Amino acid sequence: MGTSLKPAHIDLPATQMPDPNHADCRGVASILSRVGDKWTVFVIMMLSDGPKRFNELKRMINGISQRMLTLTLRGLERDGLVTRTIFPTIPPRVDYELTDLGRGLQQPVVALGQWAVEHQQQIAAARARFDERNGG
Amino acid sequence: MGTSLKPAHIDLPATQMPDPNHADCRGVASILSRVGDKWTVFVIMMLSDGPKRFNELKRMINGISQRMLTLTLRGLERDGLVTRTIFPTIPPRVDYELTDLGRGLQQPVVALGQWAVEHQQQIAAARARFDERNGG
DNA sequence: CAGGATCCCAGATGATACTG
DNA sequence: CAGTATCATCTGGGATCCTG
């Protein structure tokens, strides 16, 4: 298959949480997992400035396969972060757009993104140092 | 081997960015990818309140395998987010601790985490609806 | 105790071909 | 155009055994 709409993501044995202090970890991680997904991030960003069509997204996100774009969009739709609007024309046309929920998610993602941008150098440097210390 | 210290993460063909407006996507996504990693998030959270030993972490993070804990910690060390201190005693003892950089990362992660917590219900509901609309 | 080395399988992803 | 279906591959990750 590999066509499941329910990616593995996070599903710890709900039996016991890692730490009582962080009882919400599971839910959080599940969402962070989606956010951390390579393609998901890009799709959300591409949808920042209004609705986009399937092939439009495919062209914007250089390197994504048709299959992965479909799966990514389905996942986002499932989580209520993106809406899918079908225009029954010929040829068919489908628009994808962020929901309010999706737009809300953008904020924290962008915040994290800014941190990432600001510390890119440091991390790259750390990696370089580490890789050199060991056998690159 | 799957033992590589350099996980796939994001590596778009640096040739062209998806969108000029988001020229930093690659670096950002690379870091988001690390943050989105299931175990990485947990390890960072577990290290919030001071240094921890290997097996200590292993016990706290219910369900993580030895292999994955090792790999996760190595990745964090490589990125300069965690330090690894070896005490040459017998039996050996190794402490892991967040660096300043690592602690800085906590902020945005927590922010995102809060969003996640606050919208857990909505997402769960959306999923349920979606799954029902289709063949569960 | 900390972690390296192996074996191995399930699931993620790409490539390709077909369709309403 | 916007997918779906199928096949092939490649990798993440668990289980297990070994060692300083």
Image (cartoon, coloured by chain):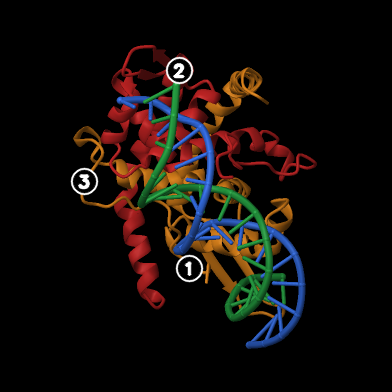
Chain colours: A orange, B red, C blue, D green
Using a 10 Å C-alpha cutoff, classify the residue at mark 2 as few (fewer than 14 neighbours), some (14 to 19) or many (20 or more): many
Contact? badges 2 and 3 (CB < 8 Å) = no
User: Closer to the camera: disc 3 or disc 1?
Assistant: 3
Q: Residue furthest right?
A: B15
Identify the image quadrant of residue A20. top left
Q: Which residue is mark 1?
A: A4
Q: Amino acid at mark 2?
A: Thr
Left or right of residue B7, residue A10 in this image: left
Q: Amino acid at mark 1?
A: Ser
Spot occupied by residue A105 in the image (x, y as percentages of width and height): 45, 44
Left or right of residue A69, residue A19 in this image: left
Quadrant for the N terminus of chain B in the image: top right
* Residue B89, visible in the rendered structure: yes
Say the numbered circle drawn on residue B83: 2
Spot occupied by residue B59 in the image (x, y as percentages of width and height): 26, 35
Q: Which residue is mark 3?
A: A16
Identify the image quadrant of residue D3. bottom right
Using a 10 Å C-alpha cutoff, classify the residue at mark 1 as few (fewer than 14 neighbours), some (14 to 19) or many (20 or more): few
Contact? badges 3 and 1 (CB < 8 Å) = no
Subunit bearing disc 3: A
Left or right of residue A9, residue C5 in this image: right
User: Closer to the camera: disc 1 or disc 2?
Assistant: 2
